[in-house]
Image (cartoon, grey):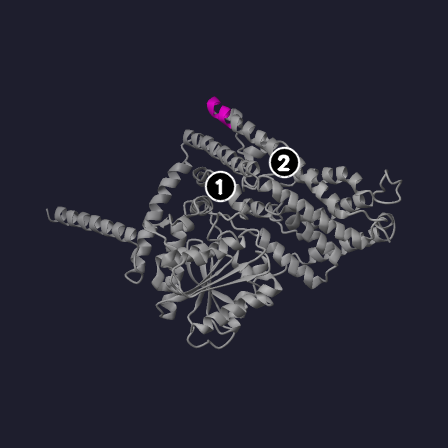
Amino acid sequence: MESQFSGGEFKPEELYKASAERFFELLKTFAAPSPAAGGAAHDWSQMAGPLATQLEQWLRMSQSAGSWFSAPGAAAAAPGFMGSQWPFGPLPLGPAAVQKPETQRIWELAARFAQLQTQLAAHWGEIARSAAQRFIARAGVPSAPPSLEQTLKLYELWVACAEEAYAATARGEDFSRLQSELANVSAAILVEQRRHAESLAKAFGLPTRNEVDVLYAHVKELSRRLAELAAGSAPPQRPAARAKSAKTAKAARTKGSARKRRGRA
Amino acid sequence: MNVASALGGGIFPELALRLSETVTRLQAARGVSVGCSQKRAVFSLGKTTLYEYLPLAPARAGHLPILICFALVNRPYVLDLQPERSLVRRLLEAGLGVYLIDWGDPDEADRHTDLEDYIEQHLGGCVRHVLGSSSGEALNLLGVCQGGVLSLCYTALHSAHVARLITITTPVDFHTPANLLSRWVRGVDTELLAACGNVPGEVLNGLFLGLMPFRLTQEKYVRLLTGRPEQRAVEDFVRMERWIFDSPPQAGAALAQFVRWFYQENAFVHGTLRIAGERVDLARVQQPLLNLYALDDHIVPPDASAALRRYIGSRDYTEHAIRTGHIGMYVSGVACKEIPRRIVAWLEERR
């Protein structure tokens, strides 16, 4: 999705300008004289093609109607796919810097991602054609070129038709499956990239994400116990927490007694 | 004048002029403020901060404080966006004590923070703080959207701490036919999702906008162009834009659990949810419950919220549907009047 925040600075006018530009394009399509009618009256059926083409182009370009979850490697692997939403770019290390089996896995995932994107794109054509057909069926046949007010109503109708056509496809099993699968492949690429980064970090003697995770788990457990102690007897504890605390307390007491015994000895 | 001549003649320059005017107004509105009522931080845990709003009217006798638990996926300031669009302000004006949880921005250190942490430690910590400050045994909990789900879990697990529960646009049955979001994420590998770490807010935002892309990313801007709004209306629009696109990142573990337990397993409905080893049984929610939802909600379909009545144990259940959309429940004129009015009246009846 195009985000006003992804560039760092909040620019509310950017999406507005882009939408206005597309709106003007649509107005031009509405106003284009119909060749079949010699330019005298509008034959909406002649517009199905241009309208569908415009919509399909937008759908192909827009991430808001694309896959919602994409990793940087996936974006790089699928030319034309809009920029990633993850807060980091592709690893600067490059596929050549890693072991061959790992590289192979990344390329397989990237190829799968591109394949899924192609399958998704096939739906854009279907949505665009369906939207145009719905619009033509409902727009009626005006006796003269529409006024500006009528054109704005036509725009509302066009949006309603596009949204209906989109919903009809987006609710389908194939589209839903694609959304999930794109998310999964994207996530798998991200995980693979991190695995590479882990092995490189290890090679340079740097702490890895997994090691940090283990430390974090320790800190989290300690924080949890501390919070339970701080809460004292005020809130009723969960059975699991009570059991855990009792076990911890018992272990602490045992250790303490052992230390005392050792101290005495 | 028809469009053909308009484009070549007078109206197209007119539209271009409107476009230019509105762009200038949008640029001028970039720095518009959000959040209007005075508050102070009273408790924090990790990235979570509990705020207490300063009173705007003498305290209403016999009323417990209200703790607002908003969704993790959006910022809570939408409930106090500006003076005339503020649920918080209306509650304060009614003499109620209001607390609000801001979950903050989880960073990579929080990627393992899970729903148990959020419910037991963060929400639980806030509840304990409010109870400690008010010397009370229970409070009124108001859960919004995903925050309503967390509030239901908390209430089912810690019934004694919640006197009354209010839910707004809260999904309970995640598998209703109209739930597009649920269809899309049904096949997501949640273990893989959790392994990715935190998910940027923009990713979820893209998902939400993708549910109705033409209306949410095109039509609303065209309306701004054709409507020729004044500066004040443009500022209102920008406030909403700021909120919509200002989405916090999501702790990977919590998001993965939310997707799995609710969107995939529909755990409330099937009674399979367990938090910290304890079963979350909605039948244990026996408090008076007010459930407010939107009839045109594309994120939480009305059926998903209305299902609550079938699963709770409360005999004092009130629901009300409002003719607006999901975001309209927080900012539309009708919702901004009706929701606080209904909450205050409902609480007053149960004082």
Give the position of the N terminus of chain A as an image quadrant.
top right
Give the x, y percent position of residue A130: 68, 40
Q: Hey, which residue is sitting farthest top in the picture?
A: A100
Q: Is disc 1 in the same subunit as disc 2?
A: no
In the image, what residue type sits under mark 1? Arg
In the image, what residue type sits under mark 2? His
For disc 2, the neighbor class at 10 Å (few under 14, some 14 to 19, many from 20) is: some
> Between marks 1 and 2, how big is the CA–CA gap?
19 Å
- In the rendering, which numbered label is found on residue B186? 1
Q: Hey, which residue is sitting farthest left in the picture?
A: A265
Q: Residue at x 23, y 52 (%)?
A: A246
Q: Which residue is mark 2?
A: A123
In this rendering, is residue B265 above or below B136? Answer: above
| Magenta span dominant secondary structure | helix
Number of numbered tags placed on the structure image:
2
Residue B33 shown in magenta: no
In the image, the segment drawn in magenta is A99-106
Q: Residue at x 71, y 62 (%)?
A: B231
Nearest the eye: B283 or B150: B283
In this rendering, is residue B279 above or below A190? Answer: below
Nearest the eye: B335 or B307: B307
In this rendering, is residue A202 above or below A245? Answer: above
